[in-house]
Image: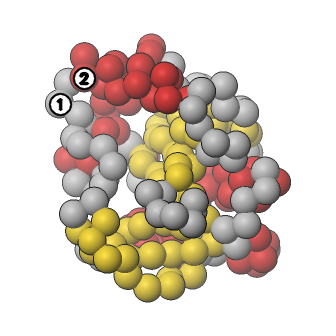
Amino acid sequence: MVEVLYTDRLRLRDWSATDAQAALKIYGHDDVSRWLHTVERIPDEATMHRVLQRWDAERSDMTPGTGRWAVTLRDSGTLVGGISLLPMPVPEADVEIGYQLAREYWGRGYITEAAWALARWAFQHSLVELFALVDPENSRAAATARRIGMEWVGESGKYHGTHLQVFRLRPDDLTRACQK
């Protein structure tokens, strides 16, 4: 079980099998799924349900400070997105922050708010830096990385079949971003 996190407007919680229909609006939407480098576009609710079951099974093998959270509106419980801290497949055991938001909720600052909360949590759990890997054409994700205080540090080699922009966040970067 991941720790439940709260912000002023959001609740970050474990994914549930009952989230499949709402999650499909995120992971099945072309405007969202085109940027995912670790998850294919989900074609239907049954497939989404299987993905959520797989995520649940993987939870027990997660290293401390990592996990997957459903992002919900605090007042209504409406599922609006997903956010994760996952180990990157590199020898250094770096951790990648990933975020997805249902198209209808873009532009409201939800992912920035969720990412700040999750990054604070990660740094409290002994992580010293987080990375985001962003497709060079995904200007919205790059802007979000910068808003949460991430610094562009270069490009990856081929990672999941493509070259990606690499952003890094350290505790001091987060503190400065949250004070703006």
Vertical side of 130 occupied by 40: above or below = above
- Residue under the point 78% across and 50% down: 125
Vertical side of 18 occupied by 4: above or below = below
Residue 126 placement: quadrant: bottom right
Indicate the position of residue 32 as horizontal and vertical percent values. Answer: 29, 50
Q: Name the residue under label 2.
A: 47
> Mark 2 falls on what kind of element?
helix
125 with respect to 97 (left or right): right
83 with respect to 38 (left or right): right
- Residue under the point 54% across and 38% down: 68
- Residue under the point 61% across and 56% down: 115
Q: Which amino acid does label 2 sit on?
A: Thr
43 with respect to 60 (left or right): left
Position of the N terminus, as image quadrant, is: top right
Q: Name the residue under label 1.
A: 43
Q: What residue type is labelled 1?
A: Pro
> Mark 1 falls on what kind of element?
loop
Residue 55 shows in this picture: yes
Position of the C terminus, as image quadrant, is: bottom right
Residue 148 placement: quadrant: bottom right
How crowded pointer 1 is (Cα within 10 Å; few <14, some 14-19, many 20+) is rated as few
Report the Cα–Cα distance between label 1 and label 2.
7 Å
- Residue under the point 31% across and 33% down: 25
Residue 22 shows in this picture: no
Count numbered badges in the picture: 2
**In this orientation, which residue lies closer to the viewer: 123 or 144?**
123
Question: Are circles 1 and 2 on residues that touch, CB within 8 Å?
Answer: yes
Residue 2 placement: quadrant: top right
Indicate the position of residue 39 as horizontal and vertical percent values. Answer: 30, 44
How crowded pointer 2 is (Cα within 10 Å; few <14, some 14-19, many 20+) is rated as some
**In this orientation, which residue lies closer to the viewer: 117 or 165?**
165
